[in-house]
Amino acid sequence: QVQLVESGGGLVQPGGSLRLSCTASGFIFSRYSMSWYRQATGKERELVAAISSGGAITKYVDSVKGRFTISRDNAKNMAYLQMNSLKPEDTAVYYCAKGNTAFTSGPFGSWGQGTQVTVSS
């Protein structure tokens, strides 16, 4: 079955950086888009970034454009989210999700357990 395991979260000061990783198994990774979602306390889950199956196409929510970069390594069945210039409002649980298609439009139907990112001084 599909398994997604996130890692790399933690506590970071404003302006700092973190790199999240998602280890995928149980499906043919290179055939599906991947994404990162986040959910802050008391808020709905939101799509942060998505990447197509081959990695050529990416999309981002406006609030992270220019600061976050999504990438993938199909040889290693891994997806990543590089987060720079972090802000307190980036604090959330971050989830890796598998697309049901090859495209960044999703939908995204399988989720990891999440990793906490806290941005605070």
Image (spheres, rainbow, N blue to C red):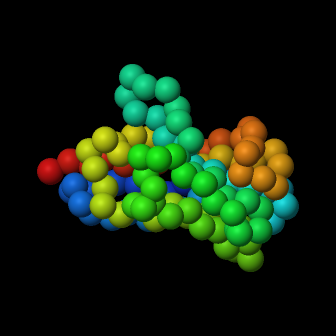
Q: Residue at x 60, y 54 (%)?
A: 59
Question: Which residue is more in the foreground, 33 or 21?
Answer: 33
103 with respect to 112 (left or right): right
Residue 91 location (% of width, % of height): 34, 43
**Eyeballing the image, is 107 above or below 8?**
above
The residue positioned farthest toward the left in the image shown? 121
Q: Residue at x 59, y 59 (%)?
A: 22
34 with respect to 120 (left or right): right
Q: Quadrant of residue 31?
A: bottom right
7 with respect to 98 (left or right): left
**Eyeballing the image, is 92 above or below 28?**
above
Q: Residue at x 30, y 61 (%)?
A: 85
Residue 4 location (% of width, % of height): 66, 51
**Eyeballing the image, is 14 above or below 110?**
below
Q: Residue at x 22, y 55 (%)?
A: 14
- Residue 42 seen in this snapshot: yes
- Residue 5 seen in this snapshot: no
1 with respect to 66 (left or right): right
Q: Quadrant of residue 10?
A: bottom left
The residue positioned farthest toward the top in the image shown? 42
**Eyeballing the image, is 42 above or below 86?**
above
Residue 6 location (% of width, % of height): 55, 54
Counting the numbered discs, the total is 0
